[in-house]
Amino acid sequence: MTRTVVLGAGLAGLRAGVALAAAGHEVTLLEKEPEAGGIARTISLNSFLFDHGPHGFHSRDNDLVEEFKTFVGEGNYHRFAKRSRIYFNGAYFDYPLKLRDLAFNMGPNRLASALFSYLYARIQRALDGRKASNAEEYLVGQFGRVFYDAFFGPYTARVWGISPSRIDADFIEDRVPHVSLGSVIKQLFLPDKKPRLSPSGRPIVHDIHYGYYPKYGIQVLSEGLARCYRELGGHLCLSTRPVAIDTADRRIIVRQNGEAHDLAYDHVVSTIPLDSLIRLITPEPPPEVQAAVASLVYRPVVLVCLCINRPQVFDVFWVYYAEGEFNRISEIKHFSPHLAPEGKTGLCVEISSSPEELQGAGDETFYRRSVAELKKIKLLDEAEIEDYFVIRETNAYPIYHIGYRDTLKTLLDFVKSRGIETAGRQGEFSYINMDQAMRSGREAAGRVIAAAANVPLTNYV
């Protein structure tokens, strides 16, 4: 029987494990945390349920939507219509932008300037046809200089921690749609029931009109995958960390409960952070690979989860902020009424951080910063907050510096040369959503299954 080891039990790793076990492999899935799910986990506090950030499931692929329904279980999820806003210059705007909001909140002079800049940029882009070289050029071409300077530029810079001029344009293009000038004008002046635009940082391919969410938190999806994996005979080793991967002898040294032991393998699928994976590999990678690893950068995020003694704060799922301490606030009860006690709600405040701040600042520091900003914008009073906790995500967002594709190719080629397949957001250094993570895990498993059976890959993907 083919022995395959999967590193990391997030959605990509779990989905890879299910496919491999179903194909008859002897699968061992290693997870450093005491429970499976990765960032698709749910934390309970005083009858409030918080995910690691908002986790609505969106996909244009019907097969992935059906997988979601299967693993969560029929009747155990809600279907919802997405609603969001952006906040800048002291006012809230529906997103996508609507002329009535702009007219009401911006005033006639600034609105005229913004619309002229918007249309001028779109016409110039249509006539020029030149590909943007960085995120700033792309966003200015998409929204105009006035809207860029007011919201999209500051928002992107704060979320990613660097100037948009240093972010590869390919990254933003994946998240902002290519629409015609006529469509732009129609969206501005006519009601549009089908939102198409999304702030950078949210893949537009998934920004469709409806989503799905488990009644009791996104961990239900992870648990469904883990249950299926175990029923197929897969071994799930929790609180287990790989400490070295000997690709010459095909064995992994793992540490579990303070003890180290060897694990022999025929194939490996890795969904752990790409830089962490490469640092585990022996024999040692060549100098150019080590240099490339050193250039990978992630943007940490802190999630301040607040239990609120109020039925509702927003009438939308989330709000993006162009200024202040946080990037986005999401309200959990819009995803499911079961996530908070009756008459109460919860807010998840997202704050981009640095590695140093993430490690050095205490939970109360982030809480106090959040409360001060909430009071400043007159959204919430501290007396309404019953309790809170803080989640820290070290590798939340891969940062796509200009030229990152060459670096990434060097690293992925090296890993593949050592017989390891990669999958998922962390494994492929790719900012993808849940459906793509599941697909990525399934496709990585397909490559392993095809290689083990020595058959064409098309039979398995």
Image (spheres, rainbow, N blue to C red):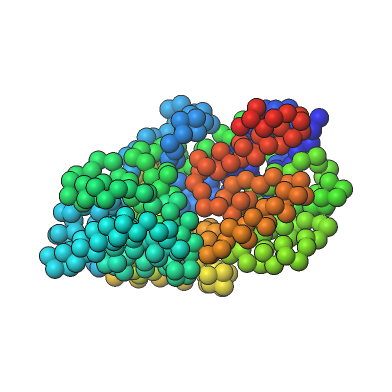
Q: In this view, does 29 lie above or below 228?
A: below
Q: Is residue 51 above or below residue 79?
A: below
Residue at 21% across / 47% down in the picture?
186
Furthest residue to the right?
249
Where is the N terminus found, in terms of image quarters?
top right
Where is the C terminus found, in terms of image quarters?
top right
For this rendering, which residue is in front, 211 or 249?
Answer: 249
Count of number-bearing discs: 0
Specify whether 184 is left or right of 364.
left
- Residue 311 seen in render: no
Specify whether 130 is left or right of 283.
left
Expressed as whole percent of the image width and height from the top left, the position of residue 205 reads 42, 44
Residue at 66% across / 47% down in the picture?
422
Furthest residue to the left?
108
Q: Quadrant of residue 206?
A: top left
Expressed as whole percent of the image width and height from the top left, the position of residue 306 reads 40, 57
- Residue 263 seen in render: yes
Specify whether 2 is left or right of 65.
right
Residue at 72% across / 48% down in the picture?
416
Residue at 62% across / 37% down in the picture?
443
Expressed as whole percent of the image width and height from the top left, the position of residue 178 reads 36, 49
Specify whether 222 is left or right of 365.
right
Expressed as whole percent of the image width and height from the top left, the position of residue 341 reads 37, 45
For this rendering, which residue is in front, 81 or 209?
Answer: 209
